[in-house]
Image (spheres, grey):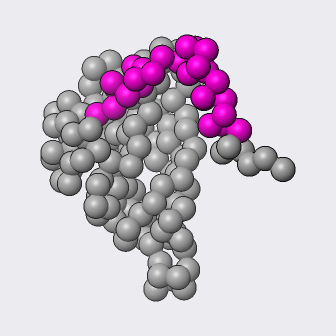
Amino acid sequence: MRRPRREFLKLVSLMLAAELVPAGSALAEEWNKPAFAAKKLDDLYKALGANAPQQSDQVVLIGPEIAENGAVVPLELESKLPNTEMLAILIEKNPNPLAAVFTLPAGTLADIQTRVKMAETCNVYLLAKAGGKFYYAAKEIKVTLGGCGG
């Protein structure tokens, strides 16, 4: 039985060989290395170009009150703002606060479900870019030790 990862790598290799995906494609060029390397939220905002984001009830972050396993914390992200271009997950006390960035093509529904890794109890932020401005929602998520609630 073949493994899904092996099948995926084989498919990517075939696409590269057929030049359907150019080597060193735009995906690599779009990666914001300073944002993912930032250690402080202020540095991260600067790297993303998010000067003074505003809190908005149109940006929705849903996650558990208590995460029993910090390695797999489920999150639901939604932006009800028109023309949402980007969503980013920021985890305040992780070694690198930027957990993920989702670039949304025009007309895409800004509704994502994912899982993140959290080092400890802290605030999690959903940053949304819409119409050239940045907005956010925040939620404190408690991470328990060994799923014991402590």
Who is closer to the viewer here, 142 or 105?
Answer: 105
The residue sitting at 38% across, 28% down in the picture is 28
Left or right of residue 92: residue 110: right
**Position in image of residue 60 (x %, y %):** 46, 42
Please, is residue 123 above or below residue 62 in the view?
below
Q: Quadrant of residue 9?
A: top right
Q: What are the residue bounds of the magenta stretch?
A: 7-32
Per the image, is 123 magenta? no
Number of callouts = 0
Say which residue appears at 50% left-offset and 65% top-offset.
71
> Viewed as shown, does residue 119 lie left or right of 44?
right
- Seen in the picture, residue 141 relative to 149 is either above or below; the reply is above
* Viewer-closest of 129 and 81: 129
User: Residue lying farthest right?
Assistant: 1
| Image x and y of residue 137, in percent | 36, 45
Image quarter of residue 124: bottom left
> Does 21 appear in magenta?
yes
Of all residues, the one furthest to the front in this rendering is: 17
Residue 129 in percent (x, y) is at 34, 28
What type of secondary structure mainly makes up the magenta span? helix
> Does 15 appear above or below 65?
above
**Residue at the image point whose x is 55% and y is 38% from the top:** 112
Q: Is residue 59 visible?
A: yes
Which residue is at a point 29% across and 55% down the rendered structure image? 96
Residue closest to the eye, 137 or 49: 49
Q: Position of residue 15 (x, y in %)?
A: 61, 21
Query: Is residue 55 in view?
Result: no
